[in-house]
């Protein structure tokens, strides 16, 4: 799963945004972004890529409105084309969520250790789906990131990982005319680029902590290559 991530302004982030046809200028530093918070989401409308902050917790258009009864910030790749909550969004409303890093917790018995995962170079482009909900005079745009089974090299940290896309895959994912079989193939476990994992202070578990993570000096960074 992916329950926390960072988005920091950098030249490499704007390289990704430029490749997606998005020009939104400087972005504020955002650390430890948590579910239900607004996140930068790239989606396609009338054949053109657009950018918007969306609520990171999908609210299906047919639902009664926002609810936290079910965890809707991540969608499982294995069932996304059959789930009532996600099927329509997968077919018609796919998106990209840029990120500089994401946080995952490694379990060891009853103990958990937080790790900050970053690309060795560049920034992440996570596959996502989005929805528009309307009711009671309110309009809510929301999204879910898609997770898949971890590649073997990542399983030492966690059994699931966000779906990560390279530039070519981003274009296919956003294209409203892409074939379903090709889209499903993009959701298979893979790492399009090497990752680095650094153990960090577990106080990152507090969603109110919006500071940069503190690396633990007694843990060596891990290089993860598919």
Image (spheres, grey):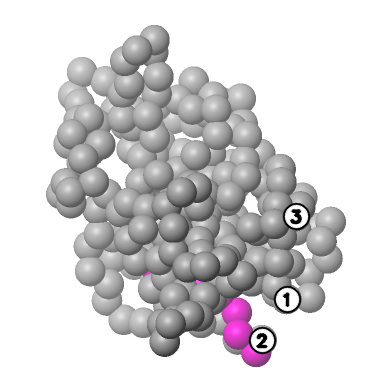
Q: Main secondary structure of the magenta part?
A: strand
Crowd around label 3: few <14 · some 14–19 · many ≥20 (10 Å): some
Q: Is residue 43 magenta?
A: yes
Q: Quadrant of the C terminus?
A: top right
Dot 2 lies on which element?
A: loop
CA neighbours of label 1 inside 10 A, class few (<14), some (14 to 19), many (20+): some
Horizontal relation, residue 214 to residue 18: left or right: left
Magenta-tinted stretch: 40-46
Q: Residues under labels 2 and 3: Cα distance?
A: 22 Å
Disc 2 to disc 1: CB gap under 8 Å:
yes
- Earlier along the polypeptide chain: callout 2 or callout 3? 2
Q: Which residue: 31% across, 30% down? A: 114
Pointer 1 with pointer 3, Cβ within 8 A:
no
Query: Would you place residue 153 above or below residue 12 in this image?
Result: above
Instruction: Compare marks 1 and 3 and give the one earlier in the sequence.
Output: 3
Residue 10 in view:
no
Q: How far is mark 2 from mark 1, CA to CA? A: 8 Å
Residue 47, which numbered label? 2
Q: Left or right: where does residue 110 sit relative to residue 216?
A: right
Residue under pointer 3? 81
Q: Is residue 146 magenta?
A: no
In the picture of the structure, the residue carrying the numbered disc 1 is 176
For the residue pair 174 and 61, the one nearer the viewer reads as: 61
For image coordinates 34% across by 66% down, the residue present is 38
Q: Nearer the viewer, residue 83 or 34?
A: 83
| Crowdedness near tag 2: few (<14), some (14–19) or many (≥20) residues, C-alpha within 10 Å | few
Residue lying at the far top in this picture: please name it.
109
Residue 40 position, x and y percent, is: 40, 69
Vertical order, 216 against 163 (above or below) = above
Q: Could you say whether the residue bearing mark 3 is in a helix, strand or loop?
A: loop
- Residue 53 % position (x, y): 39, 73
């Amino acid at each position: 799963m992916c329950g926390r991530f960072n988005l920091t302004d950098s030249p490499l982030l704007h390289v990704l945004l430029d490749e997606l046809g998005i020009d939104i200028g400087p972005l504020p530093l955002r650390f430890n972004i948590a579910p239900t918070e607004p996140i930068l989401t790239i989606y396609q409308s009338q054949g053109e890529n657009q950018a918007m902050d969306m609520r990171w917790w999908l609210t299906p258009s047919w639902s009664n409105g926002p609810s936290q009864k079910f965890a809707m910030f991540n969608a499982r790749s294995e069932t996304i084309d059959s789930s009532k909550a996600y099927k329509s969004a997968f077919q018609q409303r796919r998106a990209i969520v840029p990120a500089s890093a994401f946080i995952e917790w490694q379990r060891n018995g009853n103990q958990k250790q937080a790790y900050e995962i970053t690309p060795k170079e560049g920034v992440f482009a996570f596959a996502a789906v989005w929805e528009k909900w309307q009711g009671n005079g309110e309009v809510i745009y929301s999204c879910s990131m898609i997770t898949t089974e971890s590649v073997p090299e990542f399983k030492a940290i966690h059994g699931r990982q966000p779906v990560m896309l390279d530039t070519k895959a981003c274009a296919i994912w956003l294209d409203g005319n892409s074939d379903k079989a090709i889209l499903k193939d993009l959701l298979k476990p893979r790492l399009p680029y090497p990752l680095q994992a650094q153990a960090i202070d577990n106080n990152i578990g507090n969603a109110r902590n919006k500071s940069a993570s503190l690396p633990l000096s007694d843990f060596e960074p891990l290089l993860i290559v598919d």
